[in-house]
């Protein structure tokens, strides 16, 4: 029997090669025209103002928090309220920036619960990190209100949210996250890692609202150097091509032209691929809906994940594995890792972490594959 994997990226190989070829021929794989085209395409697609292509979403989150810390004068150990139910990148990034992650609990959407966030606010709280788990917008609107009320900075880990939309005010009008809902976020970080909705091998996109913060992030993304190599090398007007200044201790976090080429092609298909994911989700929903994690009202999720909550999760996964079906778990509660152990209890996330499983979700799934997954879950539940 053919194994059915949780994720399987689909690359349009010929189109990717067409984008890549001229740059490989030129011998230019560094940031430049392709990364700039991708950044422009991303701002056009999302309606967000600024975008910086990074080598990962982790790097984007790290840059975002570092920049916010510098520009907003945050101190060592200042607090960022975050979720324990996420990929560790989210919380590692907070630690990288010398800040302290404080876990709040989650809601039925597996996203931050505004009430719990409110309870965790202290005089040292500077920011809230919201993760749109699986592409869900959860209670982001309430989190935004809370941030406004307490003058906290909002950062969105949008690793799962490429293409997620939220219907706002005008009935039927689709609005991109970041324009209306999420519009007050200081930073959004997307992932183009190989199993995300817009796979580009690796890569991420950082969108910061304040132009000065975005431009500092750009400098920090290449060692803190104040001019990029492209400007110094290929720009015919650039004088003193060899000269640059290093005002900041930066990082090696920028994306390159190879990943940008894959992302440019992927972006052309993002909505189409997400629509395909939605169809798969609808089929799961029809038969397994009583077990599924709900999507927030008015959210058109990217459907990065389709998650169930079941009582004997580990047993179910083993049984599905016996049938060559390989679901995933998103996520273990980060509190279970020693690095994040010193936290107040978050019972809802702890409970969810024991019950969650993610069904196979990718655009290479056939109708038969989906049927096989559903039948297997029905039989084993
Ligand atoms: C994948 C993921 C990241 C990290 O993305 P990379 O591009 O691999 O660095 C961050 N947060 C969440 C929620 C993720 O799923």
Image (cartoon, rainbow, N blue to C red):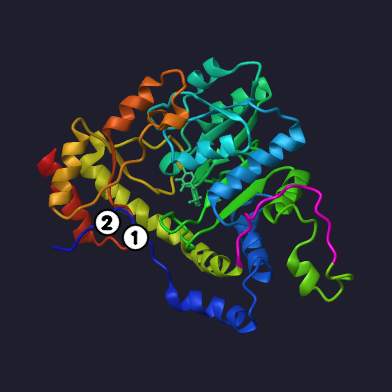
Horizontally, residue 366 falls left or right of residue 319, namely right
Q: Are marks 1 and 2 in contact (CB under 8 Å)?
A: yes
Question: Where residue 24 sits in the image (x, y, percent)?
Answer: 58, 80
Give the percent coordinates (x, y) of residue 369: 21, 58
Query: Quadrant of residue 363 in the image?
Result: bottom left
Residue at (46% x, 31% y) in the render? 339
Most distant residue in the right direction: 239
Q: What range is drawn magenta here?
A: 243-256
Mark 2 neighbour density, 10 Å: few (under 14) some (14–19) many (20 or more):
some
Residue 5 marker: 2
Out of 213 and 24, give the one closest to the viewer: 24
Closer to the camera, 123 or 207?
123
Which quadrant of the view contains residue 86?
top left
Q: Position of residue 308 (x, y in %)?
A: 27, 38
User: Could you tell whether 291 is left or right of 330 in the image?
Assistant: left
Judging from the image, what secondary structure is the residue with disc 1 in? Answer: loop
Q: Residue at x 57, y 46 (%)?
A: 189
On-image quarter of the C terminus: top left
Q: Nearer the viewer, residue 361 or 92?
A: 92
Judging by the rendered image, the residue that carries numbered circle 1 is: 8
Pick whichever, 225 or 351, lies toward us: 225
Q: Give the distance between the C-alpha atoms of the residues marked 1 and 2, in whole angstroms.
A: 7 Å
Is residue 243 shown left or right of residue 45?
A: right
User: Against 187, is 145 above or below?
Assistant: above
* Residue 170, picture quadrant: top right
Question: Is label 2 in a helix, a strand or a loop?
Answer: loop
Q: Determine if residue 169 is in view.
A: no
Residue drawn where x is 62% and y is 49% of the image: 206
Q: Is-magenta flag for residue 278?
A: no
Q: Is residue 190 left or right of residue 248?
A: left
């Amino acid at each position: 029997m053919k194994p059915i994997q949780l994720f399987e990226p689909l690359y349009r190989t010929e189109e990717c090669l067409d984008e890549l070829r001229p740059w490989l021929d030129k011998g230019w794989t560094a940031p430049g025209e392709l990364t700039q085209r991708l950044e422009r395409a991303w701002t056009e697609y999302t309606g967000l103002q600024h975008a910086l292509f990074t080598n990962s979403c982790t790097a984007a989150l790290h840059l975002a928090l570092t920049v916010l810390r510098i520009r907003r004068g945050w101190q060592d150990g200042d607090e960022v309220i975050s979720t324990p139910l996420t990929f560790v990148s989210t919380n590692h990034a907070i630690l990288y920036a010398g800040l302290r992650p404080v876990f709040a609990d989650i809601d039925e959407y597996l996203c931050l619960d505004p009430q719990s966030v409110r309870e965790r606010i202290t005089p040292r709280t500077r920011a809230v990190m919201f993760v749109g788990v699986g592409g869900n917008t959860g209670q982001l609107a309430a989190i935004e209100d809370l941030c406004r009320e307490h003058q906290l900075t909002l950062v969105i880990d949008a690793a799962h949210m490429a293409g997620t939309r939220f219907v706002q005010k005008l009935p039927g009008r689709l609005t991109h996250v970041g324009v209306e809902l999420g519009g007050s976020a200081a930073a959004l970080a997307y992932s183009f890692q190989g199993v995300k909705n817009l796979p580009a091998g690796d890569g991420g996109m950082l969108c910061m609202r304040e132009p000065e913060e975005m431009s500092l992030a750009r400098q920090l993304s290449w060692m803190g150097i104040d001019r990029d190599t492209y400007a110094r090398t290929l720009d015919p007007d650039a004088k003193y091509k060899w000269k640059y200044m290093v005002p900041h201790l930066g990082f090696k976090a920028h994306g390159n032209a190879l990943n940008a080429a894959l992302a440019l092609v992927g972006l052309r298909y993002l909505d189409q691929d997400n629509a395909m994911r939605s169809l798969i989700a609808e089929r799961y929903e029809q038969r397994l809906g009583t077990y599924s994690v709900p999507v927030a009202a008015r959210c058109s999720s990217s459907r990065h994940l389709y998650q169930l909550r079941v009582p004997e999760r580990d047993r179910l996964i083993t049984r599905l594995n016996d049938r060559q079906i390989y679901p995933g778990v998103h996520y273990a509660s980060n509190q279970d890792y020693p690095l994040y152990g010193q936290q107040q209890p978050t019972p809802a996330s702890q409970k969810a972490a024991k019950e969650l499983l993610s069904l196979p979700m990718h655009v290479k799934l056939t109708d038969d594959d989906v049927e096989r997954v559903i039948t297997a879950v029905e039989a084993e539940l």
